[in-house]
Amino acid sequence: QVQLVVSGGGLVQPGGSLRLSCSPSGGAFSGYSIAWFRQAPGKEREFVAALKRSDGIYYADFVKGRFTISRDRTKQEVYLQMNQLRPEDTAVYYCAAGRPITSTLYNKSAYGYWGQGTQVTVSS
């Protein structure tokens, strides 16, 4: 059983940066792919980025060049560095863990463990 703890959200101006962290509680990330999803009000939860357990990295097109997913194996944490934030990035961001195959990395149903979500608001 993997429990995920998410931190790092907040309010930021357009063009600003935030870093989200995801860490396991009561388990470890080894053997799991870790992904970030987000959900804006009235919208479906959507894929943002994933770090496959084989260290492959995947991004949604709308964050390429702005967001970076990374892992600190010593701290057992996964990060989402978000730069050049836009108002449309406003959402609750979730960390998820699972063992999806590559073709299902983008699908939220492929992940069995979810963190509590953290609000990111981009506004002037």
Image: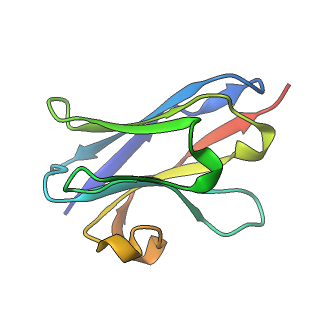
Question: Residue at coordinates 76% horizontally, 59% vertically from top-left?
Answer: 41
Q: Is residue 99 left or right of residue 91?
A: left
119 to 45, vertically: above or below: above
Question: Residue at coordinates 75% horizontally, 36% vertically from top-left?
Answer: 86
Question: Residue at coordinates 59% horizontally, 63% vertically from top-left?
Answer: 46
Q: Quadrant of the C terminus?
A: top right
Question: Residue at coordinates 59% horizontally, 35% vertically from top-left?
Answer: 66
Quarter occupied by residue 82: top right
Relative depth, front residue between 56 and 8:
56
Question: x and y percent of residue 100 in the render?
Answer: 30, 72
Quarter occupied by residue 50: bottom left
52 to 25, vertically: above or below: below
Q: Is residue 121 left or right of residue 9?
A: right
Relative depth, front residue between 108 and 60:
60
Question: x and y percent of residue 43 in the render?
Answer: 73, 66
Q: Quadrant of the N terminus?
A: bottom left
